[in-house]
Each structure stands twice: as C-alpha cells, then as structure tokens.
Amino acid sequence: MITGELKSRIDAVWNDFWSGGISNPLEVMEQLTYLLFIKALDERQTLAENKANRTGEPIDEVIFPEGEYFHPEGRARGRPYGGLRWSRFKNMAAAEMYEVVDQYVFPFLEDRAEDSTHAKHMGGARLSIPTPALLQKAVDGLDAIAMEDRDTKGDVYEYMLSKIATAGQNGQFRTPRHIIRLMVEMVAPQPDDTICDPASGTCGFLVAAGEYVRDNHPTALTDDAQSKHFHNGMFSGYDFDNTMLRIGSMNMQLHGVQNPDVSYRDSLAEDHSGDVEGYSLILANPPFAGSLDYEGTAKDLLQMVKTKKTELLFLALFLRLLKPGGRAAVIVPDGVLFGSTKAHKELRRILVEEQKLDGIVSLPSGVFKPYAGVSTAILLFTKTNSGGTDHVWFYDLEADGYSLDDKRTPLLHEDKLGLGPELHSDEEHEKNNLPDALARWRARDGAELKRTRTEQSFCVPKDDIVISDYDLSINRYKEVVYDEVDYASPTEILDELAALEEGIQKGIEDLRMMLL
C-alpha cells in the first residue's frame, strides 16, 4: 500500500511539471515513463554487475557497454556509455544533465527500440521537458521516491496513473481500479491462461490479472515452464495510441512482467485471422466511440454482425478472439443489453443461444465520473459454440464505495473499500456492494438460484430471456415491491382544504381591519 509520504513526493513531482509549463497530464505521464525506464535500465545493469562480481561470470546482457556512444546523426561528440546511466547523470549540474539526457540518453533509447517489448515502445522518444531546471527537479524527485520492490514500483505507477483519471477529458483511458479487481476476481485467471485486452490503454486489466495469478498461484513464478509462460506468453494488449502503449508497457514492467505482448493495433480495423480463438480469457473496457465506416472495419467482424457501432463490433471481436472454453469479463454500455436494432438482438441471441452467458452486473451511472456519466454493465460469458445458458445471474450494483458525483469521494475508511473487507453492517453494504457482489457471483449456481427478483441479485431462466426477445436489461426482470400507503378519503381532503381556505380568508380580513 502506498503511504502518505510517497503520495506527497509524487504530488511534488507532478506539481513541478505543471508549474514548469507542462499541463497536459498525458504528456507529464509520458515524460515520467521515459525517465522511469531510463532509471530501470541503470538498475538492471547494476544488478547484473553485482551478480557477475559474485559469480565471476560475465554479464549476460550488457546494457551500457564499454566505449563511447555517438549520436546516430552525428550531431554531438561521443560520450562514454557509462555517462548515460541514471546513477551518473543524476549528480550533474542542470545544464550538463539536460544536454546528456537530450543529446545522448533519448537517442540511446531509440537505438534500443528492438531489444524488448518494453524498449520498442520507447522508439520515437522525445524529451519535451522545456528547461534544465525542470529536468533536474524531475530527476531529483523520482530519485527520492523509494521503489526497491515490485509492489512499491507498481503502486507508485498506479498512483501516477490516477492523476490521468482526475484530469478530466483524458480520464476515459482508465477504468477504476476497484472495478477492474472485481472483474478479475470474478473470472479468476489461471497460470495457464492466455489473457488479452484488445483496448489495453494503461494495461490496468492485464496488471490486475498478473497480480491475481501471483497472489493465488505461487507456482506460476517458481515452476520454470509456468514462469516462462507468465513472462512471455500470458499477456497481450493492443492499442492504437503510442503514448498509451508506452504507459501500458511501463505499467506491466513495473509490476514485474518481463516481456508481455503490448502492441500497436487498431482492433476493429485490422484482420484477426492470426488471433482467432487465440485466447482463453478476455478482460476489457473498450471505448464506445459511436460509429465506424464499413470500409474501415475488419471484414471478419462484419461477417458476424452488420453494424457500425463500436460497442457491438468489440463484442463480436471478443467472440472471435476467444478459444472454446474461454471466458470474458467486459464492460459494455447499457444500450448493448436492450438495443432494438437487428445487430443488437442478434449479438444477444448469439450470447444466449450459441455461447454461455453467465452473468450481468449493472453498474451505477456515476462509476466513471467525472469524465463520463454513461450507464454501463459488466458482461460475463463463456465461449462454447454449443450453447449452455441455463440461467443468467443478475446483480444490481448500486454503490462501489465512492460518491457517484464528479468528486468520487470515498464513503468508507480505506480498509473498507474495494473487495478485501467483509462488511458486517447494512450501512457499510449500502456504501460498498463489491464484496457482496463477488460472494453472490460465486454462489450463482447454488443459493442464488433461490433468490427472488425483488432482491439485489437473482437468476433468470433462459426461457424467460428468450420470451423477452433476448432483452438483458436488469430492469426487465427486477420486480419492485411497493409499500402500501393509506391516503385520506377525497371528502377528508376537501374538508382540510376548506378549513385552510377559511383560515386564509380570516387572516386577510384581520389585515384589512388593521389598515382601516
């Protein structure tokens, strides 16, 4: 857990950028990502050197070799590779540090772009910090933030990412962390899963899935075969924004995933023949950008569903990418659940009749504020290609632990937020439904089958959904119990009105007498 002191140090670095003239939160995040990557390269070289000194064996991977580094375009004289290391240039005067970082370190990152999946996203790296003084503040600030272990590194970066979410228009790139955790816990990733997020953004879903596997399956990192899969084959994320690819890749690296497949791809526009049935788990919150042109949409998706709406195309994409037996937990706008177009109905029919629709969690409309107030739901399904839907579990999530206005203020103490605590009182449950939602999801094939539709969660038989034209809106099936209220008879109400009128007239007459 990140401490208050760490938060204060990060806030100070962030404020230095703002006061130094960089006000775009994504640009701040991108520059911090570059600097953290440079720092990480130096730390890797130091670890390798220490290991070589202990064992007497040569360094496996030399990042900063002997000799001098020359700018590829010959714009600057050569400089020793050792001078490009964070531990060296951090002690330089501001002007010299700026020259080294701008003229040597960033071109060096460009040259290493093919060395790993993380390094390739540093291709095209540019220093946009405008002054030597600001660069020195940023380097000093990051150097003062203790990030010795993986958990702390991950938490620090997550806290930095939260700055994007609170920045208004850019916040759509980030799903709230507690909602991500709920979805991950529901699908329970396994060590042999291959996990994909086709709209990965900051890679929040992939990071959370990795943390779940670490916490619940220790052998995933101690068994050689499982460890190799965890670091090299388990995680795939796609995005078509290079800034988000850099940020997402760094997020994975700082959470200890060595070589994930985080790649540039327009998921809706490119052919997916190489990835068809390639994944056993999909976690995603795709953007709902409205409509696309038919010409710009992948033909294999249009064969499944003829539509221009991105939310439906993404759902078709998930079905294409999942292998039989694969699971998905994805966020969709409410319109997907009850839309009346032919494409809407056909996709819902496919989920119910041809696949196994497991559950739907209706989210409160304020969960994505301050930057979006759209109503959404979590869709949970398993690809079978042979049906299997007997009943669908519904949960009406009314509170997630935070206020549902633009401020998103915590309503409970920190240890009562998220999924971790057992909430013992009705008052706590009214403010945070997440632990209850997860517990009831796990009982969906047992005790939940007996609950009535007047309760917060319940199951609906497949036949009822078919009769309702595959409408998946919770309000279609939820029954509301109205309290009986006794009202006075019309005669009594009229008598009361007459008495009130009489009092008013008497008051007017008294005022008239006072004026005479």
Image: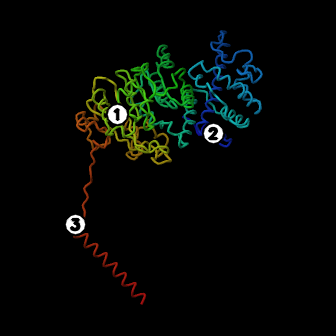
Q: Label 1: few (<14), some or many (≥20) within 10 Å?
A: many
Element at badge 3?
Answer: loop
**Disc number at residue 489?**
3
Across and down, in percent, residue 295 comes to 43, 30
State the CA–CA distance, disc 2 to disc 1: 40 Å
Q: Earlier in the sequence, mark 2 or mark 3?
A: 2
From this viewpoint, which residue is outermost toward the bottom? Answer: 516
| Circle nearer the viewer, 2 or 1 | 2
Q: Secondary structure at mark 1?
A: helix
Q: Disc 1 marks which residue?
A: 441
Q: Quadrant of the C terminus?
A: bottom left
Residue at 68% x, 24% y: name it.
107
Which mark is first along the chain, 1 or 3?
1
Q: Secondary structure at mark 2?
A: helix
Quadrant assignment, res 156 = top right
Q: Are marks 2 and 3 in contact (CB under 8 Å)?
A: no
Three-letter amino acid code of the residue under disc 2: Trp
Task: State the mark number for residue 14.
Answer: 2
Circle 2 packing at 10 Å, graded few (<14), some (14-19), many (20+), is many
Q: Nearer the viewer, mark 3 or mark 1?
A: 3
Q: Is residue 513 above or below residue 68?
A: below
Q: Disc 3 versus disc 1: distance between alpha carbons?
A: 47 Å
Residue sitting at x 29%, y 34%: 392
Q: Residues within 10 Å of mark 3 (few under 14, many from 20)?
A: few
Residue nearest the viewer, comparing 146 with 129? 129
Q: Position of residue 83 (x, y in %)?
A: 74, 22
Going by the image, does 170 lie left or right of 362? right
Quarter-of-image position of residue 24: top right
